[in-house]
Image: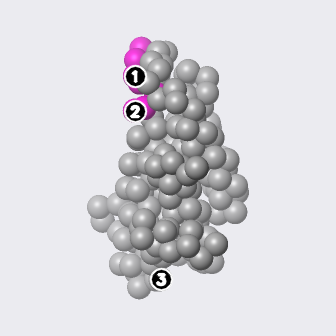
């Protein structure tokens, strides 16, 4: 039986991967486009979205925030897609596990923290929606095709399977 949690996390995965697929055909210069009011350039926003999903999952799996990786060369859109798929699958599994109420305690950036697992699970969904919307705004502001990533389009995709 498919649950609401399955659908919510399924939409997050589908929409994020569809956005990465839409961005895969952009020229390197187009990946650097931005517009006021957004996180930054398309590529930087995609890297941020993927990295955050990975960090949320790491906290849920290990109970602690991992150190931020050192800045290296930008990941390719294909690499971001693979990383995001893994993180989305992991978040969906944690959400479906029934342990969203557990409390996670640890240290982040030298400061103690205490929060319910549900906070990270909800943040992953909200954060993904926010940054997908920003990338779509950048695409549209520069006259590039904007993928339809809403829940209605997700349902259409499910019906077509």
Could you tell me if the residues under marks 3 and 1 are in contact, i.e. CB atoms within 8 Å? no
Element type where label 2 sits in the image: helix
Q: Is residue 112 magenta?
A: yes
**What residue sits right under mark 1 in the picture?**
115
Q: Quadrant of residue 133?
A: bottom left
Could you say where residue 50 lies in the image, as x and y percent from the top left?
56, 50
Q: Is residue 9 visible?
A: no
**What residue sits right under mark 3 in the picture?**
145
- Distance from Cα at disc 3 to Cα at disc 2: 33 Å
Whichever of callouts 3 and 2 sits on the residue coming sooner in the sequence is: 2
Q: In the image, is 78 to the left or to the right of 38?
A: right
Majority SS type along the magenta span: strand
- Distance from Cα at disc 2 to Cα at disc 1: 7 Å
Label for residue 119?
2
In the image, which residues are magenta? 110-119
* Mark nearer the viewer, 3 or 1: 1
Mark 2 nearby-residue class (10 Å; few <14, some 14–19, many ≥20): few
Could you tell me if the residues under marks 3 and 2 are in contact, i.e. CB atoms within 8 Å? no
Could you say where residue 122 lies in the image, as x and y percent from the top left?
41, 40
Could you tell me if the residues under marks 2 and 1 are in contact, i.e. CB atoms within 8 Å? yes
Residue displayed at 58% across by 50% down: 1
Mark 3 nearby-residue class (10 Å; few <14, some 14–19, many ≥20): few
Residue displayed at 39% across by 79% down: 140
Q: How is the image coloured?
A: one colour
Q: Is residue 149 magenta?
A: no
115 over 93 or under it: above or below: above
Could you say where residue 100 lies in the image, as x and y percent from the top left?
47, 29
């Amino acid at each position: 039986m498919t649950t609401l949690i399955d659908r919510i996390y399924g939409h997050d995965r589908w929409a994020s991967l569809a956005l990465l697929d839409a961005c895969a055909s952009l020229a390197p210069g187009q990946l650097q486009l931005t517009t006021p009011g957004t996180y930054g350039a398309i590529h930087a926003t995609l890297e941020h979205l993927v990295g955050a999903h990975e960090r949320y999952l790491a906290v849920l799996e290990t109970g602690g925030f991992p150190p931020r990786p050192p800045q290296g060369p930008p990941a390719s859109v294909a690499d971001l897609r693979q990383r995001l798929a893994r993180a989305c699958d992991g978040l969906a599994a944690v959400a479906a596990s029934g342990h969203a109420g557990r409390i996670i305690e640890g240290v982040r950036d030298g400061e103690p923290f205490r929060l319910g697992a549900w906070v990270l699970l909800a943040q992953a969904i909200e954060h993904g929606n926010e940054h997908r919307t920003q990338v779509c705004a950048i695409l549209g502001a520069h006259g590039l095709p904007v993928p339809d990533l809403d829940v209605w389009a997700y349902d259409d995709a499910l019906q077509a399977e």
